[in-house]
Amino acid sequence: MGELTPGFRGHRRIESDRVPPGQYLTEGFPVLSAGPTPVVDTGEWSFTVVNEVGERVSWDWAAFAALPHETPTVDIHCVTRWSKLDTTWRGVSVDTLLADVATAADFAVVHSVDGYTTNVPLQDLTDGQAWVVTGYEGAPLVAEHGGPARFLVPHLYFWKSAKWVSGITLHDEDQPGFWERAGYHDYGDPWLEQRYQSGW
Ligand SMILES: Nc1nc2c(c(=O)[nH]1)N[C@H]1C(S)=C(S)[C@@H](COP(=O)(O)O)O[C@H]1N2
Ligand SMILES: [Mo]
């Protein structure tokens, strides 16, 4: 009866199918920041979307909290080679944030209060693929991991998930962000190991 697959092996097999090439699984949650952790007071926090002709829509903390929230459970993959399965977050879908924004732009730049930026094609942020999250595993998101609010775009390497997020700008042309200008891949698909620009 060797062809019967024990449940344990079946489970392991499914897990490894969820780990992109060159990644290892971690149960921990490493902190990776280019600089010090900024202090962001929710009383002063706002999130702003600016479209390609400069029209703006903004939410303060209370208005953001009143938007419909979702609790996505997703796998995350850092370019430094750790992956973490089944992380659960709470936040607002980018679809909700863009609902009243008129745009024909193809590109977005995500901005953070520490000056960090990262670029993502707009089509990668819609249809339930990205969120602005304020909660992690049932608790408010801690500052080290980007609290009070961070971006979450789990199908791309985790550097695209900007911490301490302050807004999105929409553009007709692609504009590389902080790590992308430093040589990281423009798109960053973990399944294709798009870690660095060709030539790196
Ligand atoms: N504002 C900001 N966002 C950021 C970073 C940063 O330095 N500043 N680092 C990025 C990188 S390289 C990664 S891997 C993840 C790490 O998130 P974590 O510290 O919650 O694990 O945040 C990303 N978002
Ligand atoms: Mo990273």
Image (cartoon, rainbow, N blue to C red):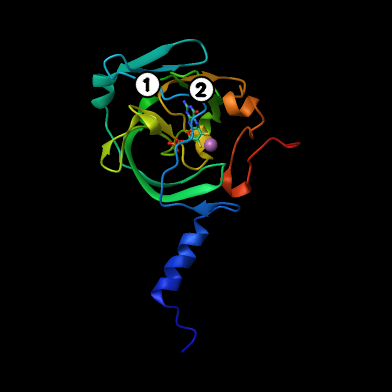
Q: Which mark is residue 49?
A: none
Residue drawn at (46%, 19%) of the image: 114
Residue at the extreme bottom: 1
Mark 1 lies on a secondary structure that is loop
- From the Cβ of disc 2, is ligand 1 less than 8 Å away? yes
Q: Is residue 80 above or below residue 116?
A: below
Which of the two residues, 49 or 110, is positioned nearer the viewer here?
110
- In the rendered image, residue 40, in percent from the top left (x then y), is placed at 34, 20
Three-letter amino acid code at the position of disc 1:
Asp
Which residue in the protein does label 2 denote?
116
Query: Where does the image place residue 6, in percent across and percent down from the top left?
Result: 42, 77
Horizontally, residue 66 falls left or right of residue 46, namely left
Label 1, residues with CA under 10 Å away: few <14, some 14-19, many ≥20:
few
Residue ID for mark 1: 100
Quarter of the picture containing the C terminus is top right
Tell me: 3 left or right of 38. Answer: right
- The residue positioned farthest toward the top in the image shown: 54
Q: Amino acid at mark 2?
A: Tyr
Q: Residue at x 41, y 12 (%)?
A: 56
Q: Residues within 10 Å of mark 2 (few under 14, many from 20)?
A: some
Question: Which type of secondary structure does the marked residue at label 2 adopt?
Answer: loop
Quadrant of res 38: top left
Look at 54% across and 22% down and name the residue there.
Answer: 105
Q: x, y percentage for residue 32?
A: 48, 35
The reply to whether the C-beta atoms of the residues labelled 2 and 1 are less than 8 Å apart is: no
Mark 2 or 1: in front is 2
Per the model, the C-alpha gap separating discs 2 and 1 is 26 Å
